[in-house]
Amino acid sequence: MLAQDTPGKAFPLTVAPGVPLRLYLTKRLTKRMDEPVHAKLIEPLFAFDREVVPAGAEVVGRVTRLDPVPRRARAAALLGGDFTPLHRAEVQFTEIVMPGGRRIALNTLETEGLTSIFTLSSAKKKPSKSGTPNHGGILGIGRQQAQAQISGRTRGVIDMVRGPDKVERLEDLLLAKLPYHPQWIRKGTRFDAELRDPVRFGDASFKEEDLRLVGTQPPADTVVHARLITPLNSKTSKLGSKVDAVISQPLFSADHKLILPEGTHVTGSVTLTQRARWFHRGGQLRFNFENIDLAPGLGINAVARPTIRTAATLIRAESTGRARVQVDQEGSAKTVEPKARLLNTALAVLLAANSTEREGDQEVGATGNTDNGRASMGGLSGLGVVGSVAGRLSRNTGIALAFYGMAGSIFTNVLARGVELEFANNSAIDIRFGARR
């Protein structure tokens, strides 16, 4: 419990260093030095018990560094006929523009765009049939409120991101077939920009009665939004290794008394690991949370309290972009890849089969042109535009490139290992306190 706090005592409202700004690009970003960056917040920022920056606030920055892609990625691009000197753009965000026009200076770490895309349509909230107010997005308790959180509020970053859709995949595929193409970061690309310096939002006053539940056991079935600060990987994480997460939105009781402020730590351990296997079977992880610890330096005179023992499991996790993260009732998470990848393989098989066919009833000259045209199309799946030109000049070369492309596509999309389940630092998760369902 909090002891001997003077009613009306002021406490600072500060967003600590390391807290990520969850953003998405509002404009396509060309990969050039000092290129201006325009983004918006997907989720609000909280400090202690309240929202200090709303979702949708504009955030601006610039491209501060261009680095070449790793050699493996560069080699894969060359084998696909892409000779563009590929780069990664590092972005730094410098300012928040509040809805009223007020500007707040920021200093974030340089960060690269994630592999997921924000989709605004998923962010639309349905009005509550019960008429219960949202209270600034603060999580409630109880079975009905928890279910509302699962279907509504907790679909923050987690359900508003996705991998590129079919049209975007086709666009990327066609561009990659060009020997040289422009480089940009697509509109909607997600960023998690960690604060390098704290951001102050004034002070807040509390009475002792308002803080009497801080650090107590959350009621069963309470759902909270959090972020992992322990990176996890289904390939490298070990059984029993520690898992640490930070609650990113405050938790209140039914009578609106603060239970867990933003910044509260929940810790646990890894209980299951399964690395990705052949035939695109994805990696799996399970981790449970067992302890609750108030964050140090909250600016309140709290009596030393032993660590709160609890039981909490994962119910939802942010997608990695490359694959969807699926969580079962036991809290086990695994990667599930989109079936759309098989379309590329089907196309490669059709092009390879088509490249070997001949036009039997036409004149020799016309037949040669038609056959070379088929081989040219087959070469497109092997080395892109370069392979297409080679197939036009030599039918045998085009056929060889077509089967090369088919073999590569079959291995990559059918036979290869699945995607490892990876939770990077600050990955968004939802956890439920109480017994497993």
Image (cartoon, rainbow, N blue to C red):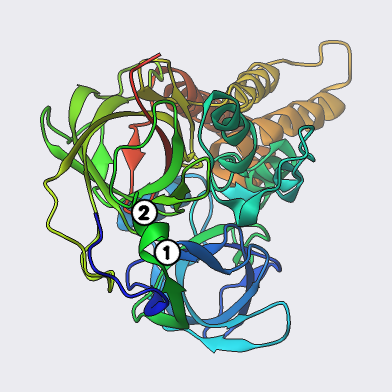
Within 10 Å of disc 1 (Cα), the crowding (few <14, some 14-19, many 20+) is: many
Which residue is labeled 2 in the image? Answer: 426
- Viewer-nearest residue: 97 or 52: 52
Q: Quadrant of the N terminus?
A: bottom left
Disc 1 marks a residue whose amino acid type is Pro
Which residue is labeled 1 in the image? Answer: 20
The spot of residue 413 in percent (x, y) is: 48, 24
- Viewer-nearest residue: 279 or 204: 204
- Viewer-nearest residue: 388 or 14: 14
Q: Earlier in the sequence, mark 2 or mark 1?
A: 1
Does residue 86 lie above or below 275 as drawn?
Answer: below
Tell me the SS state at disc 1: strand
The spot of residue 408 in percent (x, y) is: 46, 29
The spot of residue 176 in percent (x, y) is: 60, 50
Q: Residue at x 33, y 59 (%)?
A: 263
Distance CA(mark 2)–CA(mark 1): 7 Å
The spot of residue 114 in percent (x, y) is: 48, 55
Q: Is residue 108 left or right of residue 377?
A: left
Which of the 4 quarters of the picture holds residue 111? bottom left
Asked if residue 414 shows in the view, the reply is yes
Does residue 328 lie above or below 249 as drawn?
Answer: above
Q: Residue at x 73, y 50 (%)?
A: 120
Tell me the SS state at disc 2: loop
Q: Are marks 2 and 1 in contact (CB under 8 Å)?
A: yes
